[in-house]
Image: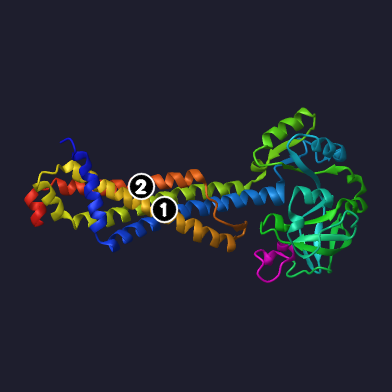
Amino acid sequence: MKGEGRIPFFLTNRYLRHGNKWTFGLIVFLMAVAFVNLVFVAALFNGIIDNANKQIVNTYTGHVFITPKAGSDYIENVDQILNTIKSVPNVKAASSEMLVPGNLQYKNIKGTWQILAINPDLEKQATNVSEKMSAGSYLEASDTDQIIIGRQIAGGEGVEMDAFSFKGAQVGEKVSIIINGVAKEFTIKGIFYTKFLDADQRAFITSAALDNLVPNLRDKATSILIRAQKTGQENQIISSLQAQGIVGTFLSWKDAAGLMSSVTNSFLSINVIMSTVAVLIAAVTIFIVIYIDISSKRQQIGILRAIGIRPYLIRTTYVLQTLIYSVSGVLLGLIIFFAAIVPYFIAHPFALPIGDSVLVVDALDINIRILAIILVAVLSGLIPSIMITRLKILDAIWGK
């Protein structure tokens, strides 16, 4: 028939205008919940991974990390190298770090935490540790008897690594750095808390203080941190540095991430598994709801067939209905997610040992999940409509 293509649209319009509004609202709401669940899982794991990566860059390695060449203990002529690095395109800041060959002692507690000698003015440009002081203040370049320590070293109530800490050291108290059996006393000037366990298990003194302790380490470093203008420029910077003749082992923050790289890869795998499960749950939920809705109209479908409407037109009608349900559910889900859930978690981020994480939304992820919900809904409308339209007309009308 020439005009039969309009029949699905006519029937869909009739069903939606004269159908039960509560049923329509319930179906749309359930689809919105399924969609929000699907998007939330992905945004949560994206946020955790993104935060872990930022913590590594901001508190620990910078974007590019240089260590001594194979067979060497130190990077020599550090001041000259830093000047060269600063002239390289895409470099925002650089700072050298020297691992102090000693142990920390507080009262009768001794530990082998990393103690790093730095130029505070350069370090605060390359990392954000200076912005994370929870007590006291950051180092000045002229400090020769002051030290700042991470929260995991200071310890105290609520500290994750308190069992292996100073059990509550405070700003103003004394600690000693012991090098080759000789102790040098330092005053705790500040305690920093980056919320990144690896970074919070370190202590910092100034290069000037190290010169007094071990003069032969002047103008040397065990590592150099380089901060790029933006993430993604690491390979360009490394190539430029090598072209400048700088000798050393060059690592991007991904290479230097170590254990955290395994952790983020695990989160990626969990994200895939959880997203798959969420899609299956959404598919089952939507199928059951729409199957019940279509089954309740079984008699209507039988009558439509009895008056000569072809089965494929009836199927198309229910596909159109589920398409409207799914699009409406997705729109409602997007409003709930971006207007309520995302702002809530920005105000109340997840507190994790690798830092506070918020939901990170990826446009590609969102689009894939929108298509997944719509596809699941359409199939959920198509399958039961095929099943019912295959029944004999009288069986459909009389419910046999």
- Which mark is drawn over residue 12? none
Say if residue 102 shows up in the picture: yes
What's the amino acid at mark 1?
A: Leu
- Residue that lies at the very extreme toward the front in this rendered image: 3
User: Which residue lies under the disc numbered 2?
Assistant: 374
Q: Name the residue rendered at 70%, 50% in the picture.
A: 58
Relative side of 233 to 378, left or right: right
* Residues drawn in magenta: 151-165
The residue nearer to you, when weighing 279 against 393, is 393
- In reply to whether residue 153 is colored magenta, the answer given is yes
**Residue 10 sits above or below residue 157 on the image:** above
In this view, the residue in front, 35 or 70, is 35
- Of the 4 image quadrants, the one containing the C terminus is bottom left
Which part of the image, by quadrant, shows the N terminus?
A: top left
The percent position of residue 317, horizontal first and vertical second, equals 23, 46
Badge 2 element: helix
Q: Where's residue 275, x and y in %?
A: 43, 50
Q: Residues within 10 Å of mark 2 (few under 14, many from 20)?
A: many
Q: Earlier in the sequence, mark 1 or mark 2?
A: 1
- Looking at the image, the residue that sits furthest to the bottom is 157
Identify whether 220 is placed above or below 204.
Answer: above
Asked whether 386 or 133 is in front, the reply is 386
Query: At x 64% / y 42%, what residue is drawn?
Result: 254
Q: Which mark is residue 331?
A: 1
Across and down, in percent, residue 4 comes to 18, 39
Residue 350 in view (yes/no): no
Residue 188: percent from left, percent from top? 83, 64
Could you tell me which residue is drawn at 50 percent across and 59 percent down? 339
In front: label 1 or label 2: 1
Q: CA distance from mark 1 to mark 2?
A: 11 Å
What kind of residue is marked 2? Answer: Ile
